[in-house]
Image (cartoon, grey):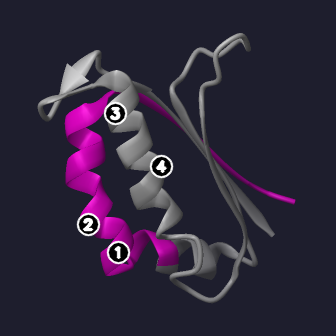
Amino acid sequence: MIKHIVMWKLKDEAEGADRLTNAREMKRRLDACADIVPGILTFEVTLAQPGLEATCDVVLYSEFENKAALEAYAMHPTHKALVPFIGAVREGRQCMDYEV
């Protein structure tokens, strides 16, 4: 199994919207990827929550059956369509994939 965790820090303003609006839109778009390919076992997108510590604005926690499933997800047109929006609104990105 491959775990794929991505964390994004968003710009204060981008694409004509504020950080929270863009975070919500990013979550909506990412949630649409939850079952786009076989082999996605877990797919959870969450936003920073007031009152809880956070150094990022959006987190994706996902688990894939194997590396091939993760690669299929990365190349899927629905996922690829997210890239320009995320690139425009993000200030920074951290990612880690690991096998368990």
Residue denoted by label 2: 81
**Residue in the image at 19% along x and 37% along y:** 88
Q: Is the residue under label 3 in contact with that under label 4 (CB below 8 Å)?
A: no
Instruction: Name the residue beneath numbered marker 3.
Output: 21
Amino acid found under the numbered disc labelled 1: Thr
Q: Comparing marks 4 and 3, which lies closer to the viewer?
A: 3
Between the C-alphas of marks 4 and 3, the distance is: 10 Å
Q: Is residue 30 left or right of residue 13?
A: right
The answer for how far apart the CA atoms under marks 1 and 2 are is 5 Å
Disc 2 element: helix
Q: Which of marks 4 and 2 is in front?
A: 4
Q: For residue 56, which quarter of the picture?
A: top right
Q: Residues within 10 Å of mark 1 (few under 14, many from 20)?
A: some
- How many angstroms separate mark 4 from mark 2 (CA)? 14 Å
Which percent across, then down, holds residue 97? 65, 51
| Pointers 4 and 1 in contact (C-beta within 8 Å) | no
| Cβ atoms at labels 1 and 2 below 8 Å apart | yes
The stretch drawn in magenta includes residue 83: yes
**Spatial CA span between label 4 and label 1:** 14 Å
What x and y, as percent, mark residue 42?
75, 66
Q: What stretch is highlighted in magenta?
A: 73-100
- Residue at 12 percent across and 31 percent down: it is 16
Q: Identify the residue position indicated by label 4 in the image.
A: 27
Asked if residue 25 lies in the magenta stretch, the reply is no
